[in-house]
Amino acid sequence: MKRDRKKSNLAPKVSDVLRVVHQIAPPHLAESYDNVGLQIGDPAAPVSKVLVGLEVTKEFLKEADEAKADLLVTHHPLIFLPIKSLSEDKPGNQLITRVIRSGRSLIAAHTNLDSVANGTNGELADRVGLQTAGRRILRPGKPEAPYVKYCVFVPKSHVERVIEAVSAAGAGIFGDYSHCTFGAPGTGTFKPLEGAKPFSGEVGRLAHEEEIRLETRCTRSVLPRVMRAVRDVHPYEEIAYDVYTLEPTGEPNTGFGIVGNLPKPTTLGAFARTVKKALKIDSIGVVGDLKTRIERVALSTGASGSLLRDWRNGTADVFITGEMTHHDCADAHQRGLPVLLVGHWTSEVIVGGRFAQMIREGLREGGFSDVVVEAARKEKNPLSRI
């Protein structure tokens, strides 16, 4: 009898959680310089508890120990730049080796979580009081996603395994749906030559095998990972496959930052006080005259000063971000654009609860109702003000 995944209480694997994370924040939305996805661990390892946070720190790992979490999901990647060694005389490497020794796995969703409307920027927009109606993306994503169609020929006995493999690797995601494939039956022929070790058939004789032409969609960036995943589960020595380039498609609901309206006009000074209260911070950086009237707000978490370099007049009355360089602040001042700087850590740590909830709901929809997904509560801002 076929198991109904919707009623299953089996523990998810790391790959199941990764698939949910990719549904929330598709990896192809990450910037080219970024490093997202599974950074440490075994995709097949079982998961009983997930701890979601901003970044891997000593405090975060201590909380993971206390919570007995076996999977960590963070916004900031622990492994960001290329690593030439894991020598523990380097502080960053100490965190990596500590995660490895603990037996935990680590998943990162960075600029891909920034690029979805309900990710980091959606949380900040909600916190500071932007109206939901009328919101738009500040800097829309590139007008195309480099998708390809991957077709592989699979014996009937291994179709389900291949579907699971390509899905875990990041293929077959359409909106709120995963595991999206299409299979067409047919007959494959081949003659194993001397030295071959065929899955079926005999050396020197023409074989006829009932196969499924299984096709799915993925981005070109994850295609190598998808092909490796198929190699791991496909029974053939030589795998027949095709790759087709698809026409570009627009994704207007993705990109950096959000623009929206406040319920009613206010002044920069009054709004700054509202933001401080909403984010529970004691200080805030301000560029501009506190008496300036504002109603339309643009925001982008983290370090987003680069968004000002192609700023168009009339975009918004004020810009909120985590941090900017002195030169970006000076440029905003010269343009007469008010800016509120809330701190990099402050602007992003707030997404933990939302992200954990989305992962929890995604796992439940997949039939994994027993896994515990929690947001970290003891993360500490490395920057303090006196």
Image (cartoon, rainbow, N blue to C red):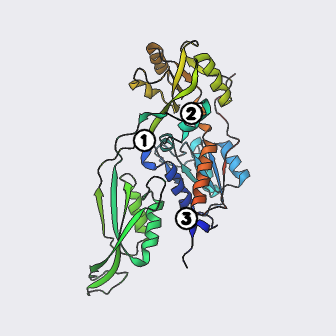
The residue closer to the viewer here, 79 or 15, is: 15
**Which quarter of the figure has residue 149?**
bottom left
Q: CA distance from mark 2 to mark 3?
A: 37 Å
Name the residue tied to disc 2. Answer: 125
Residues at marks 2 and 3 touching, judged by CB atoms closer than 8 Å: no
Where disc 2 sits, the SS reads helix
Name the residue tied to disc 1. Answer: 31
The residue drawn where x is 65% and y is 21% is 273
Image coordinates of residue 335 in percent, x first then y, are: 44, 15
**Which quarter of the figure has residue 234?**
bottom left
Which of the two discs, 2 and 3, labels the residue nearer the N terminus? 3
Q: Residue furthest right?
A: 66
Nearer to us of marks 2 and 3 is 2
Residues at marks 1 and 2 touching, judged by CB atoms closer than 8 Å: no
The residue closer to the viewer here, 175 or 50, is: 175
Q: Quadrant of the N terminus?
A: bottom right
The answer to whether residue 42 is visible is no
Nearer to us of marks 1 and 2 is 2
Q: Dot 1: within a 10 Å radius of its alpha carbon, few (fewer than 14), some, or many (20 or more) residues? A: few
Q: Is residue 12 left or right of residue 179?
A: right
Is 191 situated above or below 12? below
Q: Quadrant of the C terminus?
A: top right
Q: Is residue 217 left or right of residue 301?
A: left
Q: CA distance from mark 3 to mark 1?
A: 27 Å
Is 385 situated above or below 149? above
The residue drawn where x is 68% and y is 27% is 277
Which of the two discs, 1 and 2, labels the residue nearer the N terminus? 1
Which of the two discs, 3 and 1, labels the residue nearer the N terminus? 1
- Amino acid under disc 1: Glu
Image coordinates of residue 13 in percent, x first then y, are: 58, 63
Name the residue tied to disc 3. Answer: 44
